[in-house]
Image (tube, rainbow, N blue to C red):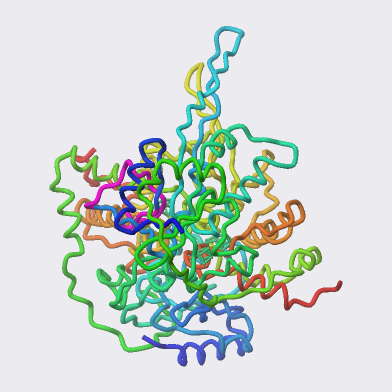
Amino acid sequence: MNYTKEIREIATRLLESGQVDMVMAWEKGDQEYQTIPFVARTVDEVNRIVCDEYAVHNLANHLLRFRDGKEKIAIVAKGCDSRGIVRLLEDNQIKRDRLYVIGVACTGVKDPLQAMKANSGFERKKDQDEGLASKCLYCIQPNPVIYDELVGEELPLPELQGRFARIEEIENMSVDERYKFFEDILSTCIRCYACRQHCVACNCRTCIFDETRPQWVGRENNISDNMMYHLVRASHMAGRCIECGECERVCPVNIPLMLINRKLIKDINGFFGPYEAGMEYVEGNKPPLSVYRENDPDDFL
Amino acid sequence: MKVLKTGKLEQVIDRLAQQADVYVPMLRGQQSGFYSWKTYNEDFDDLMFDILNVYQSPKHLILPQTEKMYSFRQEGQEVSIEEVAADIEPKVIMGIRSCDVRGIEYLDEVFLTKGYVDEFYKARRDKITIIANACYNPGKNCFCDSMGVSPTDPEAADVIMREVNGGYVWDVKTEKGEAITKQIEDLLEEQDVELFSLKPFLRKVEYDGVAEKLKDMFEHPMWEKYSEPCQTCGICTYLCPTCYCFDIQVKAWGDEGYRFRCWDSCMYHEYTQMAGGHNPREAAKERFRNRFLHKLQFFPERYGRPLCTGCGRCIVACPTGVSIIKIIDEVKEAETGA
Ligand code: SF4
Ligand code: SF4
Ligand code: SF4
Ligand code: SF4
Ligand code: SF4
């Protein structure tokens, strides 16, 4: 995937005409495999913009920084990122008319972090290429679901295999086995909260984990506080996670967070569905757990 | 020269583990760090003396992420306070690289010098023996020599292992090192070997003059510019071998509870949150600037050296590609009024 040329043209046009105040895209970092978020504010900066195979970041999260402003913002959005934009619109975090969405039909991206790690000497050398980012393997929508302008040809929907295979295996464990499984993976979380910081669905102004009076979740690094953190975060993600994979990608200790998220996705779809979060923007729409309906199922309570 | 043959490495660790808790670099599942030899499981763990470094720096062995300080109980009008017994087992950190040894040297400065000795820190530190693993082959993002660290001669090491063909030269540096060598002497062999020479660094940075220059750069536009992608996630500070910020908190139930300290990070909003609701470092820019000013200006002003050992972890692990090398370069190049 390389839309650099197209995005630069669009960015130039939008900034020149004053239609937008900034364009959120990417630029190259120090290494050839490093692509990093970049905001262009002038036409002069446009030639720094890239949109290449390492454009993995969900830029929608970055919109939060401007939620109280008035700037008009153009943002480049892949399929998953566009669902992140829907997340923010449904959550009333930003107004649709402040955005100009440059949608890109995405053929999959690679993760610069993986490449960075593989090349740093911090891992045993792997010979094979990292391949696509893990989120891309289970992508349900490579095309942007909301856009003002589309770059690239709309792609056929992928035929997914095994999106929930691991989840089903875990569902089939006994209660004790399952508890042990989650205890094992969560005991090594270092509670840096990076998964929250990089998540577009984590858009509360004051996060429950930062509240100190009262402090809902303790700051000790032990299994009970770790579990509490992940349980609470999971319940806040149910029906809201748009499967962009950023949380799992950034985690410095590789906690398999998408297992938790995919379980939620599967269950929300099962109980309240058919439902996939952020697949279209209809003004006033809310995710299933954000509204009460008389016929909501409750037999799992 | 005394040489430890690769084939005897595990035997040496076993032996040392009889008298101390030995921490060695391992790849454990998807994670890498220093783990206790007691927990080594050959089916899951991969001993990693032969790779450059591990992601999680060993600082948690001296500055645990969570550490109980004392417990208390209210009895009528009285409060009884009980110190948490500092029953600390001796530890050996084995296979640690120069950059991380320097990290410990900086922690020592903070917790042991300038008129205040942190007893919790001291109790741990005194019982730690450091067996470093000299580097002859710097990684792609290593720049320790630019930050004044010698990759082959870590200062605070008690023993330095020097990789040679077929094993390691066992280079004893201190009394602690001698003591530990006694336990394993019979496993070492006397041999003449040739040491590798240090390969050139791929990354360099000019730190000279940066601290001085930063004094006039608090309001410089570079902070706005470089903090733009930063999500203030704190990964850089949690992985860094030198970042030492902590918070003191309390857990209480009914009439009793305990106080503990835990890691904290200047990248977090809550870190500077004040009681009245004001936050002087409200946005990413201010927090980001603080991280670099602390490392490159405030710390050198107090202790004479920058709070960065050039280990490269923050560069490798930052999800948005922030690089301290770039920041230093930028400061060097910046035009200031002064
Ligand atoms: S990013 Fe990883 S280590 Fe950090 S809080 Fe999230 S799961 Fe834990
Ligand atoms: S929970 Fe993870 S996958 Fe879901 S929206 Fe947040 S960052 Fe993306
Ligand atoms: S510099 Fe990178 S790792 Fe550090 S807080 Fe910012 S985004 Fe996170
Ligand atoms: S600031 Fe970065 S390079 Fe320097 S010691 Fe810390 S993690 Fe290593
Ligand atoms: S920064 Fe220096 S001491 Fe640390 S791993 Fe790299 S070469 Fe070795």
- Note whether B119 is above or below B141 in the view shown: above
Q: Nearer the viewer, residue B111 or B213?
A: B111
Q: Position of residue B110 (x, y in %)?
A: 66, 45
Q: Identify the residue at horizontal 65%, vertical 57% (top origin).
A: B307
Q: How many marks?
A: 0
Q: Position of residue B97 (x, y in %)?
A: 49, 58
Q: Nearer the viewer, residue B316 or A269?
A: B316
From the viewer's perspective, is B295 left or right of B316? Answer: right
Residue B159 included in the magenta stretch of the image: no
The C terminus of chain A lies in which quarter of the figure? top left
Q: Quadrant of residue A106?
A: bottom left
From the viewer's perspective, is B153 left or right of A116? Answer: right
The N terminus of chain A lies in which quarter of the figure? bottom left
Q: Position of residue A182 (x, y in %)?
A: 27, 45
What's the magenta region? Answer: B25-43
Q: Nearer the viewer, residue B25 or A294?
A: B25
- Note whether B324 is above or below A47 in the view shown: above
Q: Identify the residue at horizontal 59%, vertical 42% (top origin).
A: B246
Q: Identify the residue at horizontal 51%, vertical 81% (top origin).
A: A28
Residue B153 visible in the displayed image: yes
Q: Nearer the viewer, residue A205 or A179?
A: A179
